[in-house]
Image (cartoon, rainbow, N blue to C red):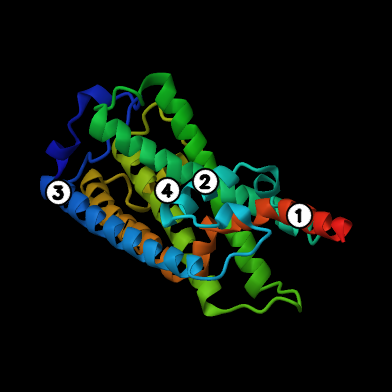
Amino acid sequence: MFDSLWENAACADGLCREVFIGLPRFMHTGFYILAGMMMAAFAMASYLKIRIWLSGADEDDTPELKRISPIGVIILSIRKLFSKECFFAYRVKTQNIVRQWALIITMWAFYLLVAGTATVALDYDFFYGSILNGTTWQVFSLTLDLSGIFLGFTLIFFLLRRYVFTPERIVGNFEDAAIMILLLLVVISAFALEGTRLAIQDFPNHWSPGGNFFGLIINTLFMGNKGILQLFYIVTWMIHVGLSFAFILYIPFSKQFHMFATQITTANVAQRNNYRAGLMYQD
């Protein structure tokens, strides 16, 4: 039924990325329209949230935030992301080293997946797949696959820690659960989508341990029926896109939006302490 949508001889060996393979043409157009609307809503909500932050009074020991614009906050947050205090999650280092490394893995796996998704989009839309192919694509695919695996396990770790093996000092709430479960569903649906695609293509030379694992399970469940797999792929694609858009749109309205501010405050802790220590020394 959908066989003609999977005809792509150039990628038969699995050494390149077929972004919209197996999908009807109207879904390509619909995706770009919805993605544009989603990004516009995200940008507007983020702008309003940052404006609220900047409406407060400046402190003398946070000079980098004085008279900064909302765009400046984003730029500063990206720059501070690579500070050693933020990179190694120093805020939780003294509390629990296991939680510290789980947080480091979660944070950088998430950022790698975001950067990887953006790279795939740029390569597809502006370079026509000329960059991500051959060995480059295999290494790139393996990196993102491992990032997804690590992110999935650390999300499960945090969910179990907060709602099953809960320390007395931790109080769980719906919002914390919602954002983690939603992100976990995005990861699982991504692996299900990738696994279905690999099963339809008879598992080509693709470096994706997570995708291959899901593909083997899904292929077994549907007994290798290509027609059912192709239909399941379209449904899974819509679910994955819907979950991804919902997660992105939820960020500005949730506590997770602190991902744009945490690195700034974390990296400025040492600067703030030094500044205050200097004032005390002068007194």
* Vertical comparison of 242 with 219: above or below: below
The residue carrying pointer 4 sits among few (fewer than 14), some (14 to 19) or many (20 or more) residues within 10 Å by Cα, namely: many
Kindly identify the residue that appears in the image at 24 percent across and 27 percent down: 128
Q: Nearer the viewer, residue 240 or 12?
A: 240
Report helix, strand or loop for mark 1: helix
Give, as a three-letter code, the residue at label 3. Answer: Thr
The picture places residue 258, in percent across and down from the top left corner, at 54, 62
Q: Which residue is mark 2?
A: 78
Mark in the foreground, 4 or 3: 3
Q: Nearer the viewer, residue 217 or 280?
A: 280
Report helix, strand or loop for mark 3: helix
Give, as a three-letter code, the residue at label 4. Answer: Phe
Give, as a three-letter code, the residue at label 2. Answer: Ile
Kindly identify the residue that appears in the image at 45 percent across and 70 percent down: 52
Give the number of the disc on residue 211.
none
Q: Are marks 4 and 2 in contact (CB under 8 Å)?
A: no
The picture places residue 158, in percent across and down from the top left corner, at 63, 63
Mark in the foreground, 1 or 2: 1
Q: Which residue is mark 4?
A: 191
Q: Nearer the viewer, residue 54 or 224?
A: 54
Mark in the foreground, 1 or 3: 1
